[in-house]
Image (spheres, rainbow, N blue to C red):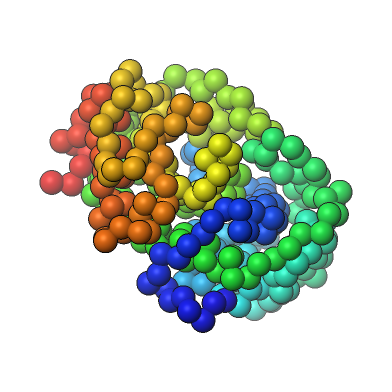
Amino acid sequence: MSSTLSPADWPELGLSDWIDTRDAIHRWLQVAGKVRLRLAPLVNHYWHSTFYLTARGITSSPIPYNGQSFTIDFDFVRHRLIMAKADGGAGGFPLRAQSVAEFYDRFMSELARLGIVVRISARPNELPVVVPFRQDDAPRPYDADAVHRFWLVLSQSDRVFKQFRAQFIGKCSPVHLFWGGMDLAVTRFSGRTAPPHPGGIPNLPDYVTRESYSHEVSSCGFWSGTAPIDYPAFYAYAYPQPPGFAEGRVRPEGAFYSTDFGEFILPYDRVRESDSPDDTLLDFLESTYVVAADLARWDRAALERR
């Protein structure tokens, strides 16, 4: 970790500076995420498969197994993968430069050593080009400083997202990290069902997408960037997207609607460089929600804290 950074920082995080490391940990998180997906009971919108922020990194939260539970943590301060069982068993290994295949083999071996036997679909999801984990043997770097900065951005975003979430009393997701896109997100619901999602997300079964978007939502989040948005950014979208959404007036200055993604985008640097990053991000979250809720005629009086 960098000695010049503190947990109060909104650090620089240029995508090109760490994209190879980013792509590695994205796949590592998918390996761990698929274990939780396989073992945890199904929760609506696939919330049983997500991860959460901790004071040191990312956690699976307790995963049930044979009458007890275990956790999988990515510690991005000490840069270790940590497994802990309710009966006191523990395992893990350092996070360092290694191929996806090497990570997968070490990960599954540690689970087996702890008596946890699980079969997963051993290939990534939501990526345009898929290489099965065991066959992905290309060397992968591990830039510990960049990973630590990424975690700080997630940590700051998590804190502000939770403040935004607290103002909504209708159904709302936790603030959680989806390992498919490696994005941190929080989603508000109107209470109405939605038309079936058309699907089509690369390497993701359409039935997963349709369950995830079974009800009308206004969602926002953070992700580290994907072409043509080749920089970290906050996003906001609605499903189904009401007429006029793309033309909605949102704040702050610098936010825009991306026709490539069908979402409003706020570059992370616009938040980081502002006089008050918290207020700038909250302005984006609130203004994009209001556009979605008003155009779709949500019952805001019943759904929002007054």
Give the vertical position of 255 relative to 118 (above or below): above
Give the x, y percent position of residue 253: 28, 43
Q: Nearer the viewer, residue 199 or 146?
A: 146
How many marks do you count on the picture? 0
Q: Is residue 69 above or below residue 49?
A: below
Give the camera-side residue of 21 and 290.
21
Image-based side of 280 in relation to 100, left or right? left
Question: Which x, y percent locates residue 150?
Answer: 53, 62
Quarter of the figure with the N terminus: bottom right
Q: Position of residue 215 (x, y in %)?
A: 41, 29
Question: Is residue 169 found left or right of 51 in the rendered image?
Answer: left
Check the image and report above or below for 23 versus 197: below
Q: Is residue 111 visible?
A: no
Residue sitting at 68 percent across and 76 percent down? Answer: 90
247, above or below 99, in the image: above
| Residue located 67% across and 52% down the image | 23
- Residue 197 appears anywhere in the view: yes
Outermost residue toward the bottom in this view: 3
Foreground residue among 111 and 164 = 164
Q: Image point 31% across, 20% down: which residue?
A: 244
Q: Is residue 234 left or right of residue 2?
A: left
Q: Residue at x 33, y 18 (%)?
A: 243
Q: Position of residue 290 (x, y in %)?
A: 24, 35
Which residue appears farthest toward the left when viewing the image?
Answer: 306
